[in-house]
Image (cartoon, rainbow, N blue to C red):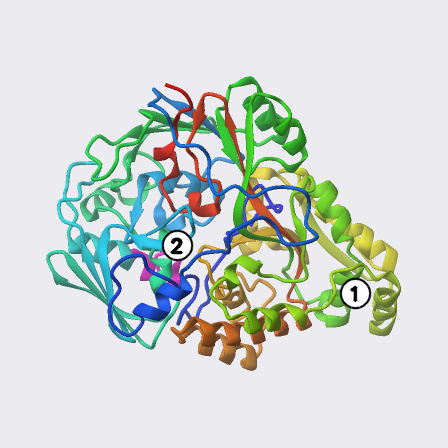
């Protein structure tokens, strides 16, 4: 989904290929998955490897979770770096939206804090043939406004995502869907045009959210911006004070374990210092996407605990235009060679990161055989700085003195310092790299609005995978993909994406993904910089929030409760 690498937004997430035959999530199902793909999906969804960061990384420790809550709360307050423009699930494509929507709306499947896939609103998902997924729904699930979920609601909800005219940010994940039909009062069948290893995984993200058909139609154009979201999650939408906060209220009719807090209040604090101070003085009980410049201060404050967990996130420089100097691959390679990644990790990420030469994290290759993992990483260019070789490439390309413009923002020092690092690298090798400042609230528009990217050649992006599969990111460079902002197009790359996404067996799929990873690296389609863990701060009075990036699709706020009885 993105961010400055934002603590602001990516996308990760940023997503989806126009092709869709298998994109963003495919993997193992903790539910009773049947038929052909059962074994391969379970293996593929095993989740990231356990343990801490890779060798050579900064001295930070990954935590599997936080202590379980000891009691209930009347309410807790959570700091967000920006106000969501909407809470409509079809637009839940960045950190602010997903951090809230994940607690209000539920999906057919559920991404767990361990980054595996489990049953959600569907108690069972089966795959009777390669082109068919059947979802058997839970009975008696109540919507916030009083209705009871049926197959009609599922068909309607997925249909909004699949409608090419509906403006869904997740639409490309449905490009391989031939039909979505009701095949029983509590059964929905999805027919695919061809095998798709990614579609079933995305059903655990916002792409698989189910809302009340009656509720959405009643709200009309106001759905997502006021009133009820009419979903099934442990919280329902309460008061939205525009420009200030959003309140969620515990849904007493929830089918599962009730939320431990009666209310969750999300307050919008666009200034990094203000967010940090709010957590230090107790105005905010906690937050994700902690400003990297505050890691040390928060960890030593005594006001709470700063945790790091698996983020499936890489900090990159997104190449948004190849019409100027960056149209020559030698210029892109030179910038990558000249970048001081180690200096950026130390200053921009507060030391909590790992220098990388890969656009994908090592964790998303967990289901790959060891030889495939080696292939995916060993052939990549060195991440070490090489100014002289970079200068030679710029001279060879005839690019000395040419202008490149990169976005910067006050979202956090991770964004601003990466932009500055790119500028410094360009200056050392003969390029004229210029900074264009983007307001924090407008930064997220870079991922969805072509007009916001006008005049830019690059911008800092923290890309998060929404599933534990390298194809989530690598599909971005297929012709016409949603986040293929630079318009890269290569039939050979497209064919490999198609082959990988149509492969249910994880070993074979990831062998093809390794070829894609090398091609993306050779072409420098984005510039990889670092792996970045998820950071969460919890004040002394609360605990229970997951440490992993699962919070984007898992109802994490329901687990937050009192730290002591």
Name the residue: 15% across, 37% down.
Answer: 146
Does residue 68 lie above or below 31 as drawn?
A: above
How many numbered discs?
2
Q: Which comes sooner in the sequence, label 2 or label 1?
A: 2
Q: Nearer the viewer, residue 437 or 368?
A: 368
Q: Nearer the viewer, mark 2 or mark 1?
A: 2
Q: Which residues are magenta?
A: 160-174
The residue pinned by badge 2 equals 116
- Image coordinates of residue 363 in percent, x first then y, are 53, 57
Does residue 320 lie above or below 175 as drawn?
A: above
Name the residue: 55% across, 36% down.
Answer: 307
User: Can residue 456 be seen in the rendering of this structure?
Assistant: no
Q: Is residue 223 magenta?
A: no
Indicate left or right for 485 with 259 as reference: right
Q: Is residue 168 magenta?
A: yes
Q: Nearer the viewer, residue 480 or 525?
A: 525
- Image coordinates of residue 291 in percent, x first then y, are 62, 35
Q: Quadrant of the C terminus?
A: top left
* Mark 2 Cα shell of 10 Å, populated few (<14), some (14-19), many (≥20): many
Indicate left or right for 104 with 272 as reference: left
User: Can residue 392 be seen in the rendering of this structure?
Assistant: yes
The residue pinned by badge 1 equals 334
* Mark 1 Cα shell of 10 Å, populated few (<14), some (14-19), many (≥20): many
Residue 215: which quarter of the image?
top left
């Amino acid at each position: 989904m993105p961010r400055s690498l934002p603590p602001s937004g990516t996308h990760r997430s940023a997503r989806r290929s126009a092709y869709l035959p298998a994109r963003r999530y495919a993997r193992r199902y903790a539910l009773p998955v049947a038929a052909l793909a059962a074994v391969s999906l379970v293996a593929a969804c095993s989740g990231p490897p356990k343990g801490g960061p890779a060798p050579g990384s900064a001295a930070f420790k990954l935590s599997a979770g936080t202590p379980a809550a000891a009691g209930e709360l009347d309410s807790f307050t959570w700091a967000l770096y920006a106000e969501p423009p909407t809470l409509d699930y079809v637009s839940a494509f960045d950190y602010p939206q997903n951090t809230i929507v994940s607690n209000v709306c539920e999906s057919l499947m559920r991404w767990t804090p361990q980054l595996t896939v489990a049953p959600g609103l569907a108690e069972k998902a089966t795959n009777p043939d390669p082109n068919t997924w059947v979802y058997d729904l839970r009975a008696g699930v109540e919507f916030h406004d009083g209705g009871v979920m049926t197959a009609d609601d599922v068909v309607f909800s997925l249909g909004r995502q699949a409608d090419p005219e509906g403006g869904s940010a997740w639409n490309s994940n449905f490009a391989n869907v031939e039909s979505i039909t009701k095949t029983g009062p509590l059964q929905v069948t999805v027919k695919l045009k061809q095998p798709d290893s990614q579609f079933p995984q995305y059903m655990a993200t916002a792409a698989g959210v189910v809302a009340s058909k009656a509720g959405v139609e009643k709200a009309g154009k106001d759905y997502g911006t006021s009133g009820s979201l009419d979903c099934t999650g442990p919280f329902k939408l309460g008061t939205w004070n525009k420009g200030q906060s959003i309140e969620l209220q515990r849904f007493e009719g929830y089918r599962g374990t009730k939320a431990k807090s009666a209310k969750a209040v999300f307050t919008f604090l666009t200034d990094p210092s203000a967010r940090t101070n709010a957590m230090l003085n107790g105005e905010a009980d906690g937050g994700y996407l902690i400003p990297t410049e505050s890691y040390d201060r928060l960890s030593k404050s005594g006001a709470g605990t700063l945790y790091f967990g698996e983020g499936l996130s890489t900090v990159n420089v997104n190449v948004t235009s190849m019409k100027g100097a960056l149209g020559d691959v030698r210029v892109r390679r030179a910038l990558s060679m000249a970048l001081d990644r180690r200096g950026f990790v130390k200053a921009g990420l507060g030391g909590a990161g790992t220098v990388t030469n890969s656009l994908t994290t090592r964790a998303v290759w967990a289901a790959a055989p060891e030889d495939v993992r080696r292939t995916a990483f060993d052939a990549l260019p060195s991440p070490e700085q090489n100014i002289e070789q970079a200068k030679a490439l710029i001279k060879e390309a005839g690019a000395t003195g040419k202008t490149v413009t990169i976005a910067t923002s006050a979202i956090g020092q991770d964004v601003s310092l990466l932009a500055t690092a790119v500028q410094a690298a360009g200056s050392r090798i003969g390029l004229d790299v210029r900074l264009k400042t983007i307001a924090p609230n407008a930064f997220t528009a870079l991922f969805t609005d072509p007009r916001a990217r006008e005049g830019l050649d690059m911008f800092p992006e923290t890309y998060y995978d929404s599933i534990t599969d390298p194809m989530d990111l690598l599909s971005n460079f297929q012709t016409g993909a949603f986040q293929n902002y630079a318009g890269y197009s290569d039939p050979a790359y497209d064919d490999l994406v198609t082959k990988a996404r149509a492969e249910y067996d994880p070993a074979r799929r990831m062998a093809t993904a390794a070829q894609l990873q090398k091609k993306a690296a050779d072409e420098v389609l984005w510039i990889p910089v670092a792996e970045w863990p998820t950071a969460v701060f919890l004040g002394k009075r609360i605990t229970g929030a997951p440490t992993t990036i699962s919070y984007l699709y898992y109802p994490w706020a329901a687990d937050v409760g009192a730290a002591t009885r």
